[in-house]
Image (cartoon, grey):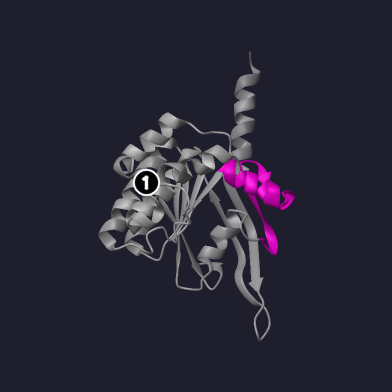
Amino acid sequence: MRPRPRAQALYLSNHLTDPTAGMLLTATDLTKAFPGEGGPTRVLDGVSFTLAAGETLALTGESGSGKSTLLHIAAGLEPMDAGEITIDGTALSTLDDGGRAALRRQTVSVVFQQFNLIPSLDAAANIAFQARLAGRHDAPWCATLAERLGLREHLAKYPEQLSGGQQQRVAIGRALAVRPKIVMADEPTGNLDEATGDQVIDLMLGLTADTGAALLMVTHSERLAARLSRRLQLSRGRVA
């Protein structure tokens, strides 16, 4: 019965020497450049960070600092030039397009500034869409999300019949209906007035906390960034 203290000591030793151990997301030395008239423009230059389960992390920085590019790479929406992203033990470099799409269906959900709802589907079907693709549709959970998001009276409406704030709430519901481990949000309040944006952030923080999902959010707002548990500030493609 003596091995337990030894095993515990080994576990602690490994976690002390490797700060990424047990992290849900690990980004290591990410670089990304885009072609330009005067040659390639490096948007990310050796960026590294981690995200733990249940943690909320704000990506901040001036316009053009690489915030959205970093989130899109982390979500598998854009390729990296060098470095590595590991999500829930899977390295993105080992996945093809289908594998990255499956990761976004099962593990990572993305909320965009432009909502990206499907115009031909009503609010209820938009909320359920990603969960159905992932084979995880749970009607009672979708109903709970609609209730929490204040959408119960609007489920039969189509996106064009909804306000911007309501559309973003549908997008949040769609993201959470699949019960992802990570929600990634790219300026989710960028198209909303301040009061509506505050309501959307309240809902997003509350629902991710209730489900245990981690939240990685790009924002230009210092006020909103202060509401998340940690911040990663970028400047000219590097961690400031």
Q: Amino acid at mark 1?
A: Leu
| Residue 232, percent from left and from top | 48, 59
- Along the line of sight, the residue nearer the viewer: 85 or 13: 85
Identify the residue at image location x=58%, y=53%: 75
- Along the line of sight, the residue nearer the viewer: 145 or 162: 162
Identify the residue at image location x=36%, y=40%: 146
Q: Residue furthest top?
A: 1
Q: Which residue is mark 1?
A: 205
Above or below, 33 against 49 in this view is below
The picture quadrant where one finds residue 189 is bottom left
The answer to whether residue 167 is magenta is no
| Residue 103, percent from left and from top | 62, 45
| Residue 215, percent from left and from top | 46, 48
Q: Residues within 10 Å of mark 1 (few under 14, many from 20)?
A: some
Residue 203 visible somewhere in the drawing: yes
Residue 23 visible somewhere in the drawing: no
Identify the residue at image location x=52%, y=39%: 131
Q: Residue furthest bottom?
A: 38
Say left or right for 108 vs 32.
left
| Residue 48, percent from left and from top | 59, 58
Above or below, 27 against 39 in this view is above
Say left or right for 97 vs 9.
right
Indicate the quadrant containing the N terminus: top left, top right, bottom left or bottom right. Answer: top right
Q: Which residues are magenta?
A: 79-107
The answer to whether residue 85 is magenta is yes
- Along the line of sight, the residue nearer the viewer: 158 or 27: 158
Q: Secondary structure at mark 1?
A: helix
